[in-house]
Image (spheres, rainbow, N blue to C red):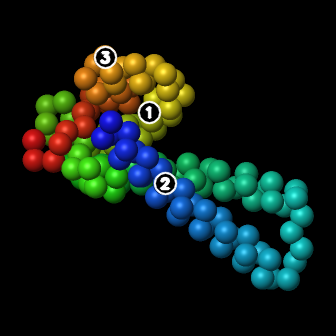
Amino acid sequence: MMRFLAFSVDLMLLSCLAALIFAAAIFGYLASGKGFSFPQILCTMFVFFPFFGFLFLFYFTSLTTGGEATVGKKLFGLRVVRKDGSELGPARALVRSISYLISVSFLLVSILMVLLLEGTTPHDLITDTQVVREGM
């Protein structure tokens, strides 16, 4: 449950940041005095979604590399480590961030895994990691 809450905090933080950046881009374009049509909004969104993907990967990768934790995990006293207790390197943290897509894509399976495998998620299995309480 703590992991879910921590992930929710992280997603809310990322969503707020992304919304501010998106709004700044729209207002900047409008401030230039040009009109903004619906097709232009769609084009902006097509540019923005890959940016959000990059922001997501950067956030989760950079904050879990080297035994650190995301903002949400820090709030709940959690951190990500390898199964042997050592810290994640940048490559493993990146693969873990990318494999979140698998966990989210198969959300029901992920929930069942968490319940049946003592908190293990698909992205933990793929990267041989675990989330532990701070100080463990």
Question: What kind of residue is marked 3?
Answer: Leu
Q: Which kind of residue does numbered mark 2 sit on?
A: Met
Question: Where is residue 118 shown, x and y percent of the image?
Answer: 25, 23
Q: Nearer the viewer, mark 1 or mark 3?
A: 3
Q: 12 or 45, which lies in front?
A: 12
Is 69 situated left or right of 42 in this image? left
Give the vertical position of 129 relative to 9 (above or below): above
Residue ID for mark 3: 116
Crowding at dot 1, Cα within 10 Å, few <14 / some 14-19 / many 20+, comes out as: some
Q: CA distance from mark 3 to mark 2?
A: 27 Å
For the residues marked 1 and 3, what is the alpha-carbon distance in whole angstroms?
A: 20 Å
Which label is found at residue 55?
none
Identify the residue position indicated by label 2 in the image.
Answer: 12
Q: Which mark is residue 99?
A: 1
76 over 111 or under it: above or below: below
* Residue closer to the observer: 58 or 18: 18
Q: Residue at x 23, y 46 (%)?
A: 78
